[in-house]
Amino acid sequence: MLEFALMVTVTGMVIVFSALVFVVFVMFIMGKLPLDGRKKPEAPSKVPEKSIESAKFAGLPVKEYDADENELAAVIVAAVYACGGENVKVTGVKPASPLPRSPVNVWAAAGIFENTRPFSI
Amino acid sequence: MVKEKGLVIRKMGLFRDFWDTIVGVLSQSGFSQLFGNFSDGGWKNLLMLGISFVLIYLAIGKGFEPLLLLPIAFGMLLTNLPGANMFHPDLFTGDPKEISYSAVLHEGGLLDVLYLGVKLGIYPCLIFLGIGAMTDFGPLIANPKSFLLGAAAQFGIFATVIGAMAINYLHIPGLSFMAAQACGIGIIGGADGPTAIWLNLKIAPEQLGQVAVAAYSYMALVPIIQPPIMRLLTTKKERAVVMEQLRPVSKKAKILFPIIVTTIVALLLPSAAQLVGCLMFGNLCRECGMVDRLAKTMENELVNIVTIFLGLTVGATTSGPAFINLRTIAIIVLGLAAFSCGTTAGVLFGKLMYLITGGKINPLIGSAGVSAVPMAARVSQKVGQEENPGNFLLMHAMGPNVAGVIGSAVAAGVLLVVCGG
């Protein structure tokens, strides 16, 4: 009986590891494939004038930022106004610094929350 | 005078009829059956009622996996009320192919009809549909090494098979396990309720109730069982390891993953195809984005309905005379051993990976290789934060956690093949 149990243990662990190692290998191959649609970096697109105007309207200094940051600032200001209404005044938008001694930034923390949301009771 | 005497006699007759009726009702009441047969098995029903109250308190008062524990506890309460006859286990003895469905429909009640979903192995597969629709395999795809941690944690299953078979050598009267029963107990170590139910249905249906209650109870007790083992097996330095941020995973990769895993696992081990196939189908519906209504139904309405039916009917199998015996105590102890072995194996493999990678992997995420999603991952996060409050291990631990679901399904398939189910 113990021989049977030992045989089951060895066989089971070998098969479980083999199956999952094979899947790992396939995942590794998948990781090498350009599945994320990686293309050559394009030239920065022209910032739509509306977003620059929005940022100016909000009183943000529109200096030598690149196109993405202008748009981001405009989106953030619009979101704040949508949530807070006219009672809220945006005085500045700057990148949040990661938590001390942690490489995870607040967006990752938000991702954590999003991924565990279905399980929260 | 004669008239008055007649009136008195009539009134006494009425009173006697009334009293006889009251006595008749009370003699058929549950109290009478409970305390009247106290030494003859009634105490077992009373004990199970007490256990059900404790489980209800744990579910509601302490919040221990209430979605699972509350239906099981209430099913336990209903089935141990003498005379209620909510559930008729005699309708379901033996092979599922030999169930008399007409008898179930004519003589059975609600719980008997709902129990057909358990007996025919339908509910575990439906629950896996919902789990797949709820699960994000991104952390696993981003860090495929997590698969190995999920595989390592399944050692608890097989170690318990050895333990259950070793009990036979003690020659305790009334306590011996056949090979199929030992395998059915071992699967508790996978910390996966639907998988435990599915496997026991096929190879050891006579212990389904005990295994299901043990499996779900230990899933609810993950935050209590795992942390001491994790602290014992790791050093402060190891627990404080901060892992690199996971790479982003593309949509295409998340869509291809369930298709690839289903194909590989089902070709390698056809007996695991039911569970893995349902899990991956649910996940594909979630990730493809083309069938959002189906995915939402799977992760909400479907899994909620099936959880209610499964929990109630599994709890209903735990009637006192069938549940209170030496075998049940042995199953509960072995289940705890299985769970602890799985956690230990996962953490030790995590330490090995810590050494191999030069300290890049936090061994705590190895404990999440048991399939209790997402509680085991949360426990890794919590224990890791005790050493380093800025350490976010949750997403890293989700990788082994969901790999454990796949691993336990594969392990169940292996046990099914070995036991000839």
Image: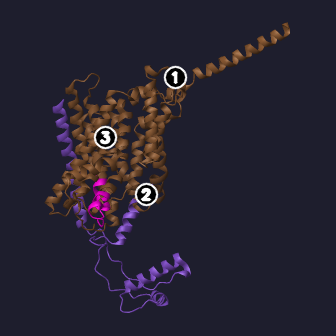
Is most of the magenta stretch helix, strand or loop? helix
Image position, residue B177 (x, y; %): 26, 28
Q: Residue at x 20, y 31 (%)?
A: B166
Q: Which color scheme is applied? A: by chain
Gap in angstroms between the C-alphas marked 3 and 2? 24 Å
Give yes or no for residue B391 being in the magenta stretch.
Answer: yes
The chain ID associated with circle 1 is B
Which x, y percent locates residue B333?
29, 36
B151 or B394: which is nearer to us? B394
Chain with colour brown in the figure: B
Q: What is the residue that sits farthest to the bottom in this orientation? A: A63
Amino acid type, label 2: Pro
The answer to whether dots 2 and 1 both sit on one chain is no
The amino acid type of the residue labelled 1 equals Gln
Q: Colour of chain A?
A: purple
How many residues crowd around disc 2 within 10 Å: few (fewer than 14), some, or many (20 or more)?
Answer: few
Residue ID at (43%, 48%): B62
Compared across the picture, whether A84 is left or right of B419 comes to right
Residue B319 falls within the magenta-colored stretch? no
Q: Residue at label 2?
A: A118
What's drawn in magenta, residue-wise? B381-403
* Residue type for callout 3: Ile
